[in-house]
Structures are given as structure tokens and as C-alpha cells.
Image (tube, coloured by chain):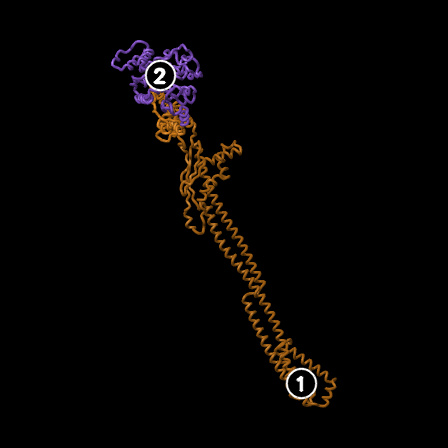
Chain colours: A purple, B orange
Amino acid sequence: MNKLEQAIRKTAGDGCLYSHAVEKPSFIEEIDKMKVSHLMTKEELEKQKIIYPDFKNTVLVNSFRELRTSLTALSSKNVVMVTSISERAGVSFFARNLAVATAFDMAKTAMLVDCNGRKSGVNEVFELGLRLGISDFISNKDVKTAEIIHESGLKRLRILPFGQSGSDGDESFSHPRFHSLMAQIKYQYSDRHIFIDAPPILKSADARILMEVCDQVLLVVPYGRDTNQDIQAAARVIGSQKFSGVVFNEFLI
Amino acid sequence: MITNPLDLVAITFKDTWKRKELGILMFIGFSMLVLFLSWNWPKMYVSSSIIEVDEQNILTPLLEGSAIATSIKNHARNAEQIVFNKYAMKYIFDILKDDIEKLTDKQKEGYWEDIRDNTSIENTGSNLIKISYRSIDPVRAQLLAENLTNLFISESVNEKKRESEGAYNFIARQAGDYHEKLLNSENALKEFRSDNLGADPASSAVVNDRILELQRSIEQSGLAINEANIRMENIDAQLSGEAEVSAHLSREGQIQERISVLQTKLDMLRMTYLDTYPDIIIIKDQIESLKTTMGNIGKDETYKISQNQGGQLNPLFQELRAKRSQFKTELAALKTRVKVTRQLLSDEKSRARQINNAVAVYAQLTRDYDGNQALYRKLLKQRESARVSMNIDIANQGMTLQIKEQAIVPLSPVGLQFIHFAVFGLIGALLAPFGLSFLLASIDNRYKFEKSLKAVNGLPVLGGINVYRNRSMNIVDVSWLISIALIFTAVVFMYGYVGWLKISGQA
């Protein structure tokens, strides 16, 4: 408990923002103490296609809740990689909202790890600007873990962006520092669920490398894009051990 | 692949919305293309006339059996051949002189082909023929329909005339041939008759009777010869028993006596027969021979002695000798008669043969004549029937082809009207994007349903996520809908405007 407390203090910075959490169990209290300097409004959330508990499309919210429940059942398998067969399948949208849905639970925290390279839109979504990320951590030994984990504008959700250094073809994810980073964030907090926003599994080597550090793989199948052969090929690449299932994304582009 | 029809419909709508930009382009493109077509679609006018064919006119039952009315139904069937023969081309070209003046022969041929293509001839009822002509010019349609109708009627009449005339000429020619044959056989018969007078079955019977008579006469003469021979033998037997000389008789006297007897007999016969009669000839011979004997007596010694002796000849002997001589004469006469009769018989037989041959030839000739005569009579009858048929056709009474409905100048065009184009254009344009989506959806084997994903893969399916709709997306969609509605309204208005132009006659 002491360790957890320390960690929370470390990430949330000093000082408690909320004074009403008197009767809550101590770890929740600690979680509540996570620093949120700016909360996104409903308009901002809707603009960025992020769900919130009283969002009017309850079917959508409940779908994400159900998915979250089945994926976060085991705390030992708390690293979930979200991938797809081809690009523009809505993986980022999925990973983002799964993390958000997980953060709905006041007993859990969530982290969204953006592994889509520099072109990823996660910075704009959460208005992170040019903050440090994974690539900076790998390329610069002076960068601390705490410097690359950022607030999201939502409670109990932290963002680990890709960062600004290096290039897309670097295969940064096979770097030992990445492995140590992942181990650190995986084991540091027992109730933290990590969602990796990964590139397409059949198109990118990064996705296959990332599979080594994750516990579960979720395959997003978008509307009218993939054939049976594609899905079977992806399932073979993922393997049955880590393959937790397929989700159908009915979005229209 | 989607097999459930409801799913297919749902997918069709979804995909159409997804590809709304393409859909809008298709809608505009299709509707404008059809509008363009309808604007440029030529107006076709059809003018037609109906001809009634009546085969049962008053003459037909009256002339039943003797005259044959040529059928008009055959003409209806061959109407096109009748209307489009060489003469017809000339007739029509005469009417359309101005149009074809500057055309070459090849162009004229094409022009005629066009006329043929635009003409339609059909049997609308059991006895109605409809001749129509279609053209972009209503006046021309009427002109050609009318002229083709007139042409058809006049050509049908001519055809019928030609047909019945041909039939008459044929039969007349046949009748002429048989007439000549009949004359020939008549002549042959006449000639034969004059060449073979008496060579008829009646004279054949006469000849047969004659032959029988001659045969009977030969038989009788044979019997008489036998009788005479027997008598001769008897007398010879008696003579051998008698003495030649019983008394002294002058030999001369005896011969004299005999000559006088024979002379008496000769005179008797001459009163009845000609000198050529056999008996007369024989008697003459005997008298002659006796006279010779008398002449020889004076020279004969033995005679002298016997005379000198004054011996007298036996009278019985004398008598027998006289008888014998008489019988001998009779026998010779009979033999001569048999010989002559046989000659006559053979003559008669050859005559009988000639008559039989002549009768056979006569029968043949008669048969020919009878046959030719029968055929000629029949042909004469047929020729008269054909003549009546021909006269009926010449008098234009054998059939009635009357125009039931005159070709008039059509007022409204036929074929596709603007309203058809409008309905086709708008509905087609609306359906085109959906049709494309439907086609693509029915051949697309990519996943479009969460449930099909579950059904096919055997992989764990955690669920499906709906579309996240935010305000800006809604605004975009609503603006799309408004645009689509505006485009649709604009297209409908364009159709309406073009339709108004067409109906008000400005286009």
C-alpha cells in the first residue's frame, strides 16, 4: 500500500484536490488524489468522439462497458493491445474509448499507450501539444518515466504518447528501454489497465513486436473492410494464447 | 456474402449512404442523360389503313362448281411481295419524285429499303389487312400509307386477273391440242375405211359362210368321186366277162353312133352351160378322140379284116362300154370340180384373214377417236368455266377489296412520349445508386455484420460498436440530406420545365 501511495503521489503531484473522499477505502482515496488539472467538458469530449457515462447514445456506452468488463476481468492480464487488419479501422477510437470506459470505474485507473508513431492523433485529441513520449524516453536516458506520462483531461486516465523523437521505421518497440518502461507501468500499479493503440497487425512489424509486451490482443474488424481470409490470417499471427477476441466496428468513413 | 434478403436491403441502404457522393453523381448523370435523350427523341407518326377482304360475293354461290373465284387470302399472305415488287417501286418513286431526283441508284436502293422497313403489313383479323407507314413526318406517313394501300389493291386485282387469264389460256391451249388430235384420228379412220371397203365384221360373216359352203361342196364332190370309182370298177368287172364282139358290127358305125350320142349330150349341155364348163370340154374331147379313131379305121388292117369278116359286136358289151365311158366322163368332171373348189376355198380363206386384220386396226382407230373425243369434250367444258372465271375477274366481280379505314394524317406521335422518359429518368436515376450498391453488396464477401462474423469465423467475438455520432457529424449529415433534397427538386423541376416546353409545343 505504501508503494501504491508513493506512486500515486509521484504521478499526481503533491496535494489532494478533493476533500469529500473521507469514507472511501484508502486505495480509492489514493486514486482520487490523482492530479487532474483540467477536466474536459462534454462538448470537448463529443468533439473528440470520447464517451462519458451520461452520453445520450447509451447503447454505445454500454457496449464499451461490456467490452471493458470482459477485458479487465483479470488484473494479471492488464496490458491490452488493440489492433486491426488494415489501416483506418478505428483502432485509436476503440483503444481510447476502452481506456475511458475502464476509467469510469472508480476502483480502476487506465492508461492509453499510443504506439502509432508521430502521425497519431492522440496529441490533438487530448490536447497534449508537443509533450515527451515513448520515443523520447527510449532515445534519451535522461528522460524519466514520470515525464512521459500525461494527464488526459479525464479522471483516472493517463496518456503515454509516442513522442517527438526518432522516425517511424526505428522499431523502437524492440528497444530494452521500451521493455523496461512497459514492465514498470504494468507492475507499478495493480489496478492500472493499459491499452495499447497499435498499428495494423498484418501491415506493420511494430504490431507484432508489441505483441510481446501485451497480455491480450483485441482485433477490430470495421464495417465492410475485411474478408474471412483476412481475419483468419490475423488470428494466425496473433495466436490463440493472447487472442481475446474480435470486435465489430460499425463506423462509417 | 450476404444471403439474407433483409440484410441485403439494409446493407444496400447503408452502402448507398456511405457512397452518397457517387450516388448523387449517378442520379444527376442518369437523369440528365435521359432528359437529353427525351429532348432529342424523334417523334414518330404512324398512319394506317385497313382493307377488308370479302370473298363471299354474290357471284360465288351462283357459279359454284363451274367457275372458281381466285382466293384473296393468298394475296393477303403475300401482301408484302405484292406491295414491294419492281412495279411498286416505280409507282412509289413517281409519287416521291422530288425526294429522289438527286439520288444515285445505290442511294435509291437504300431509300427503297427505308420505305420497306417503315411499312408494316399485317392481318388484323381473319379478313382484314392493315397497311401502316411510320415516319417522322405525319403528312408523309399518310401519303405513303394511302398510296401503298391503293397499290396493294390494284396489284391484287391485276394479280388475280393474270392468274385467271393464265388458267384460261392454259386450258384453251390444251383444248386446241386435243382438237387437233381428234381431227387426226378422225382422218385416219376415214382413210382406213375407204382403203378397206367391206372389211367390217358383217362381211367377215359372209366370207365365213362361203368357206363353209365350199368345204361342204368339196366333201360332197369327194363322196361322188368315190361313188363313180366304185361304179367304174363294177362295169370293168362286167366288161371282162363279156365277149367283145358278138355280132358283125361295123366299127365305123359304132363310132358314128357314139359320136351322135355325145353330140346330142353336148347340145343338151350347151343349152345350159358355157363352153368352158368342164363336162362340155370333156365331151368335146371325147367327140374329137372318136373322130380321130374313125379316121384311123381305114388305115388299120385288123379293123379291115374284122370288118370284112362282118363280125358283129356284143350289144351288152357295147352298152357297158357306153356306160363306162359315161362314168369316166362324170368322174373326170367331178375331179375338175374339186380342184376348182379348193382353189376358191383358199382364196376365201386369205380374204377372211385380210378382213380380220382390218377389223383389228379399225377397232384401234375407233378407240383412239373415242378417247380423244371424250377428253376434248371435257376440256371444252373446262375452258368455258375458265372463261367465265376470267371474265369475272376482268369485270372485277370475283373479289372485293375495299378500304375499311382510310389512312389519315396522324395528329399525335407514337412510341415513347415525354412522360415515359420522365418516369424512366427519375425512377431510374433514383434506383441507379441503390442498384449499384445492391449489386456490389451481393457480390461482396467482406464482413458487414457482427452476426455474420460470429457465424463464420469460430473466433471469439466480443461484440460490436455503434457509430459515435456527435453534433458536427449530425450537422454534416443534415447538410447532405438538404443537398440531396435540393438536387432532387432541381432535377424534377428541370423535367417539369422540359415537359412543359414539349407539351406547349415549343420543342
Q: Give residue B277's position: percent from left, percent from top.
A: 63, 76
The answer to whether residue B253 is seen in the rendering is yes
In-image side of A20 versus A180 (left or right): left
> Badge 2 is on which residue?
A187
Indicate the quadrant where residue A77 lies: top left
Horizontally, is B117 left or right of B357 in the view? Answer: left
Name the residue nearer the viewer: B381 or B78. Answer: B78
Q: Identify the residue at the far left of this view.
A: A23
**Residue type, mark 2 in image:** Tyr
Pick the quarter of the image with the C terminus of chain B: top left
Residue A12, percent from left and from top: 32, 11
Residue B131 drawn at (x, y percent): 43, 38
Say which residue label 1 marks: B257
Q: Amino acid at mark 1?
A: Glu
Mark 1 belongs to chain: B
State yes or no: discs 2 and 1 in contact (Cβ < 8 Å). Answer: no
Q: Quadrant of the N terminus of chain B?
A: top left
**B56 versus A233 height, above or below:** below
* In this rendering, the label closer to the viewer, 2 or 1: 2
